[in-house]
Image: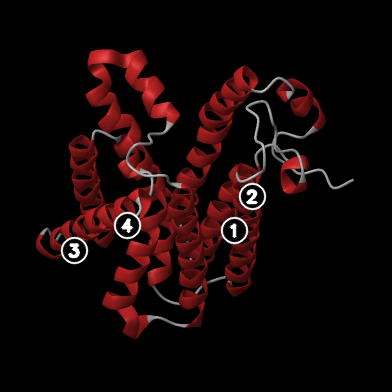
Amino acid sequence: MSVKKKALQEITLMYLIIALSGVFSYKFIQTDDVILDFLIADLVMTVVTFIFSLIKKNSSVYDAYWSVIPFYFIAVFVVELYQFLDFYHYVIFFVISLWSWRLTLSWARGWPGFHHEDFRYVDLAKQTGAFYPAVNFLGIHLFPTLMVFACMWPVFYTLGPGPKYDWLVFLGAFVSLLGIYFEYSADNELANFRKRPNPKVEDILDTGIWGRSRNPNYLGEMLFWLGVFLCGFAYNAPWYTGVGFVSIVLMFFFISIPMKDKRMAERRKGYEKYKKRVPLIIPKFF
């Protein structure tokens, strides 16, 4: 058995245990608010994930949580509320499930195993020193959990009566599918680039969709969550439930993209020319 296959089996077992911790929490810590019930279960699962990260001494144990948890929510919705679901619900649930499974499979394809840890976590550990355990839990585990939960917040409003604006459900689903397409294209082209013959450190992926946008994967993620918000808004979700989508945009523009640009500029000689030629987010087609 290969090292990666063994690692995938191990982390799959971990996530089954994580999921069970959420089920027990949801069943036994009941309040009068379904959103609060899901939030508590989400926090319990995050703590269990953090414990596994400590056991493996690798914070990248959390990486798959981002894409797995929305499908977990959808699965619980279907099991608990299937008798109340209609066609619009299944459109929304299908789009979210498609995003979740595609992104999780993409992560599994690119994850080399427990010997690898995201460079950002390694840098944070060096920068924060003795404070890293707190930074690890609050910044690497809890913060993304709350962000994704906020992104899923509008979906809870779809569990009521039919949509007020049914056309907006389809518009939201289209925007999310467009985002999935961008992410799918970007991930596949990046995976093929990493398998290129005679790779050099200074090589830059500047063909296909990466030749039209420097961050097509981030663009896809933002479009996906915008579409989810629109679907919730179709059911009269309050405007402030868009805080998750806004937080995603702010995270990409003020944290993820600057960190990526700095690292790429340090490692790739031609990156500054690439930055001048290729737009930051919005693709150029002409």
Q: Amino acid at mark 3?
A: Val
* Lower position in the chain sequence, tag 1 or tag 2: 1
| Marks 2 and 4, how far apart at CA | 24 Å
Residue 207: x %, y % from top left: 77, 43
* Lower position in the chain sequence, tag 2 or tag 3: 3
Instruction: Give the structural element (helix, strand or loop) at label 3.
Output: helix
Which one is nearer the viewer's eye here, 144 or 277?
Answer: 277
Residue at 38%, 71% in the rendered image: 159
Residue 195: x %, y % from top left: 61, 46
* Lower position in the chain sequence, tag 4 or tag 3: 4
Residue 127: x %, y % from top left: 36, 14
Residues at discs 1 and 3 in contact (Cβ within 8 Å): no
Residue 65: x %, y % from top left: 35, 50
Residue at 53%, 64% in the rendered image: 231
Instruction: Give the structural element (helix, strand or loop) at label 1.
Output: helix
Residue hosting label 2: 192
Which of the image's four quarters has the N terminus?
A: bottom left
Tell me if residue 58 can be seen. yes
Residue at 30%, 54% in the rendered image: 6
Which one is nearer the viewer's eye here, 144 or 216?
Answer: 216
* Lower position in the chain sequence, tag 2 or tag 4: 4
Residue hosting label 4: 1
| Marks 4 and 3, how far apart at CA | 32 Å
The mark closer to the camera, 2 or 3, is: 2
